[in-house]
Image: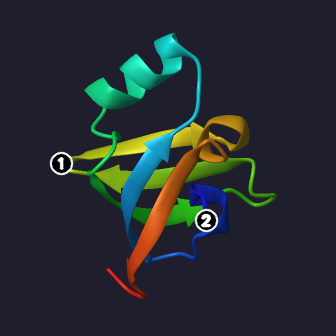
């Protein structure tokens, strides 16, 4: 399951991030890394952008980046 498969309000644990080194490093600084807990706040109309809560930060991810963040579902609602 990736961030693209999550439903609004769902919380998850990041299992791995598949992306180039520069993207992985940027996500790490934003709080999205293996072992981090994230929650999906909302998606854009055509699910091209995903707003994710990671720690104390809200991060907007494009579909290609979100598809590379593999997660494990924790609970249905945040």
Q: Position of residue 40 (x, y in %)?
A: 46, 64
Quadrant position of residue 5: bottom right
| Residue under the image location 70 percent in, 43 percent down | 63
Query: Residue sitting at 62 percent across and 36 percent down?
Result: 65
Residue sitting at the far top:
22
User: Is residue 71 toward the left or the right of residue 38 in the image?
Assistant: right
Please say if 51 is above or below 21.
Answer: below
Residue drawn at the location 81% of the way across and 58% of the way down: 46
Q: Which residue is mark 1?
A: 56
In the image, residue 51 above or below residue 29: below
Q: Is residue 72 above or below residue 30?
A: below
> Alpha carbon of mark 1 to alpha carbon of mark 2: how far?
23 Å
- Nearer-N-terminus badge (1/2): 2
Labels 1, 2: front one = 2
Taking the view exactly as shown, the residue that stands out farthest to the bottom is 76
**Which image quarter holds the N terminus?**
bottom right
| Residues packed near mark 2 inside 10 Å, few (<14), some (14 to 19) or many (20 plus) | some
Percent position of residue 12, x then y = 39, 68
Q: Regarding mark 2 in the picture, which secondary structure is present there?
A: loop
Q: Secondary structure at mark 1?
A: loop
Instruction: Provide the residue designation for mark 2.
Output: 1
Dot 1, how many residues are within 10 Å of its Cα: few (below 14), some (14-19), or many (20+)?
A: few
């Amino acid at each position: 399951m990736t961030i693209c498969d999550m439903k609004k309000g769902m919380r998850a644990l990041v299992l791995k991030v598949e992306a180039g080194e520069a993207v992985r490093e940027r996500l790490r600084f934003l709080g999205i890394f293996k072992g981090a807990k994230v929650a999906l706040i909302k998606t854009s109309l055509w699910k091209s952008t995903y707003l994710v809560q990671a720690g104390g930060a809200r991060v907007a991810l494009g579909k290609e980046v979100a598809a590379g963040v593999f997660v494990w579902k924790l609970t249905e609602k945040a």
